[in-house]
Image: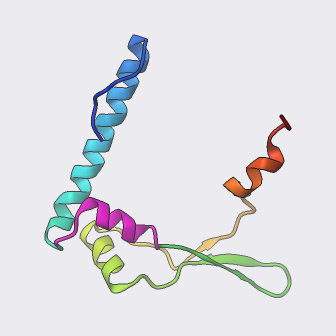
Amino acid sequence: MEARPIYVRTEDHTRGHVLAVMLAYLVRRALSRPWAALDVTVEEGLQLLQTLCSTEIQVEGGGSCLRIPTPSVALRALLDALKVRIAEALPHTDTSVVTRKKLPEQRKPR
């Protein structure tokens, strides 16, 4: 999360890069202050946040929703420090997620 080196050629791209870096610093600061009392670094907190997931629940007859399992104690502490409340369930939408495993099928043969 450093501003240098900047490998851009135009003024607009340079401004965009500096804006992205400044936003990253603001996010880092917004996370580090509440998590300091928990003795957790931003990197450690973000790694814990990666464990947050959802489970699809399908009801007989075609209905479904996404259920968010109860977070671990450590994850709950991070979210509480940020004053973030997560929903227990979300409406399900048919969103297609593309993973790296599907990329070779989509690429043109060489």
Q: Would you say the magenta stretch is mainly helix, strand or loop?
A: helix
Report the front residue among 71 and 101. 101
Q: Position of residue 19 (x, y in %)?
A: 34, 30
x and y percent of residue 108 in the render? 84, 37
Quadrant of the rendered structure where residue 100 is?
bottom right
Left or right of 25 on screen, residue 97: right
Q: Which of 86 and 1 is in front in this view?
A: 1
Q: In this view, does 70 lie above or below 23?
A: below
State the residue at coordinates (28%, 31%).
Answer: 3
**The residue stretch that appears in magenta:** 39-51
Residue found 54% across the figure and 78% down from its top: 68
Instruction: Looking at this view, name the residue that lies furthest to the front.
Output: 110
Is 105 on the left or on the right of 26, as rendered?
right
Residue at 84%, 79% (x, y): give it. 62
* Depth check, front residue: 85 or 19: 19
State whether residue 25 is above or below residue 88.
Answer: above
Q: In this view, does 60 lie to the left or right of 45?
A: right
Q: Is residue 14 magenta?
A: no
At 83% across and 49% down in the image, what residue appears?
Answer: 105
Which quarter of the figure is the N terminus placed in? Answer: top left
Residue 50 magenta: yes
Q: Quadrant of the image for the C terminus?
A: top right
Residue 102 in the image: above or below residue 22:
below
Q: How many marks?
A: 0
| Figure colour scheme | rainbow
Q: Residue lying furthest top in this view?
A: 10
- Residue 109, image quadrant: top right
Residue 83 location (% of width, % of height): 29, 68
Residue 66 appears left or right of 28: right
